[in-house]
Amino acid sequence: MIAKLIALMKELGILPPEKEKTVTEALTKLDLEKTPTKDPEIDLSKITDPALKELIAGLKAQVNSVGQTNKELVDVLTAERKAREEAAKTLADEAKKAQAKKVTDLTDKAKKDQKVPTAKEKWFRDWAEKDYEAAENWLKDAPVDKHAAPPPDDKSKQTQTGDDKAAKVAGPLGSVNSTILKNVLEQSSAAKN
C-alpha cells in the first residue's frame, strides 16, 4: 500500500524526489500495511432508546444474513471453479492422449508403407508431435525408402511348436525351416568327414 501511495504522489507531482525517502519512512511508521481491525461491537445493553435499539438489532441481523449469503456464494463459486479446473484438465489430458494416438498411428502407417525406416522412426515421431499436418502431408508424397523393411506379419509373432511348426530362419534363400536347415548342415558336415 505504501508503494502505491508513493507512486500516486509522484504521478500527481506532489512528492519531489528528494523527499521520497522521508515520506516513505513516515508512512512506514504509520503501519498502513496491517489489515484494519474489525469494527467494535455495539453493546445493545447500553442503548436506552428502544427505537434505536430495535434499529441496531435489525441492522445486525441484516449484516449477519448478508455475511452468510456471501459465504454461501463464495463456497458455490469455489466449488464451480474447482469443477471447471478439473474438467479443463480432463479435456487437456484427453486431447493429449488423442494427439499421441494420432502420432503413433501416423508413425505406424509410415513404417507399414515403407516410407520411414526403423532408424528414422524417432525422428518422424518427433516431427509428427511438433507439426502433425506437415508430417502427414510429407507422408502422402514420400517415396518408398529402400532401407525401410515392412513390419513383420502377425503370423511371425505367433509361437510355433513341434517339428512341423519349427521357427523359420531368414537366409539368402528366404525363410527356411530351422529343423530342415539343421538336418542339412549335419548331413553336409557328415559327408565331408
Image: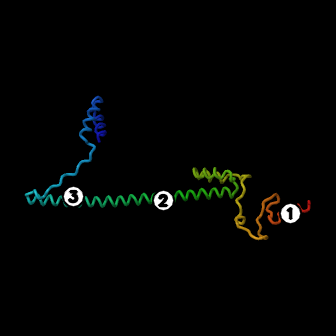
Please identify the quadrant where the N terminus is shown: top left
Q: Secondary structure at mark 2?
A: helix
Q: Please say if 114 is above or below 156.
A: above
Q: Sequence-wise, which precedes: disc 1 or disc 3?
A: 3
Relative to residue 71, is residue 52 drawn left or right? left
- The residue drawn where x is 69% and y is 57% is 113
- Residue 34 at what x, y percent from top left? 27, 45
Q: Residue furthest left?
A: 48
- Residue 127 at what x, y percent from top left? 61, 50
- Residue 186 image label: 1
- The residue drawn where x is 88% and y is 64% is 187
Q: Please say if 155 is above or below 47.
A: below
Q: Which residue is mark 2?
A: 91
- The residue drawn where x is 38% and y is 60% is 80
Relative to residue 93, is residue 84 drawn left or right? left
Marks 2 and 3, how far apart at CA: 42 Å
Q: Sequence-wise, which precedes: disc 1 or disc 2?
A: 2
Relative to residue 146, is residue 57 drawn left or right? left
Please identify the quadrant where the C terminus is shown: bottom right
Mark 2 neighbour class, 10 Å CA radius: few under 14, some 14 to 19, many 20 or more: few
- Location of residue 70 by image quarter: bottom left
Q: Which residue is mark 3?
A: 63
- Location of residue 82 by image quarter: bottom left
